[in-house]
Image (spheres, grey):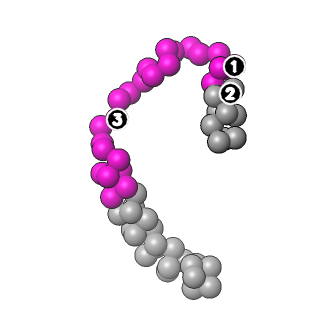
């Protein structure tokens, strides 16, 4: 709850150049974003496994 209050206070004091809610709209749904994140995590895990010692990955 405290985080939400702090975020609301920051938002109320922010000087905006663009309107709130402006910007690019999302192209992916949340479940697609999660799948994409997991895919990339798996991709980097193999690379990091080759570069880093096993003790840092466990």
Q: Nearer the viewer, mark 2 or mark 3?
A: 2
**Residue count near mark 2 (Cα–Cα under 10 Å), binned few <14, some 14–19, many ≥20:** few
**Pointer 2 or 3: first along the chain:** 2
User: Which is nearer the eye, 16 or 45?
Assistant: 16
Question: Mark 2 highlights which residue?
Answer: 10
Above or below, 33 against 18 in this view is below
Marks 1 & 2, CB-CB < 8 Å contact: yes
Closer mark to the observer between disc 1 and disc 3:
1
Report the predominant secondary structure element of the magenta stretch. Answer: loop
* In the rendered image, the vertical position of residue 30 relative to residue 4, given as above or below: below
- For the residue labelled by badge 2, is the local secondary structure a helix, a strand or a loop? helix
Residue 16 lies in magenta, yes or no? yes
Whole-number angstrom distance, CA of label 1 to CA of label 2 = 5 Å
Q: Earlier in the sequence, mark 1 or mark 3?
A: 1
Which residue range is magenta in the image? 11-35
Image spot of residue 26 (x, y percent)? 34, 35
Label 1 SS: helix
- Relative image position of residue 51 (x, y in whole percent): 54, 77
Which residue carries the number 1 mark? 13
Q: Nearer the viewer, residue 48 or 56?
A: 56
Which residue is at 30% across, 37% downward? 27
Looking at the image, which is closer to me, 12 or 48?
12
**Residue 17: x %, y % from top left:** 56, 14
Marks 2 and 3 sit apart, C-alpha to C-alpha, by: 24 Å
Residue 53 in view here: no
Left or right: residue 32 versus residue 5 is left
> Which residue shows up at 32% across the image and 52% down it?
31
Residue located at (57% from left, 79% from top): 57
**Residue 42 in magenta stretch:** no
Is any part of residue 40 visible from this angle?
Answer: yes
Please name the residue that numbered disc 3 is placed on.
26
Judging from the image, what secondary structure is the residue with disc 3 in?
A: loop
């Amino acid at each position: 709850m405290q985080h939400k209050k702090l975020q609301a206070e920051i938002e109320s004091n922010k000087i905006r150049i663009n309107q709130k809610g402006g910007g690019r709209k999302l192209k992916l749904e949340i479940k697609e974003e999660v799948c994409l994140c997991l895919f990339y995590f798996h991709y980097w895990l193999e690379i990091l496994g080759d570069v880093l010692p096993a003790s840092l990955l466990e």
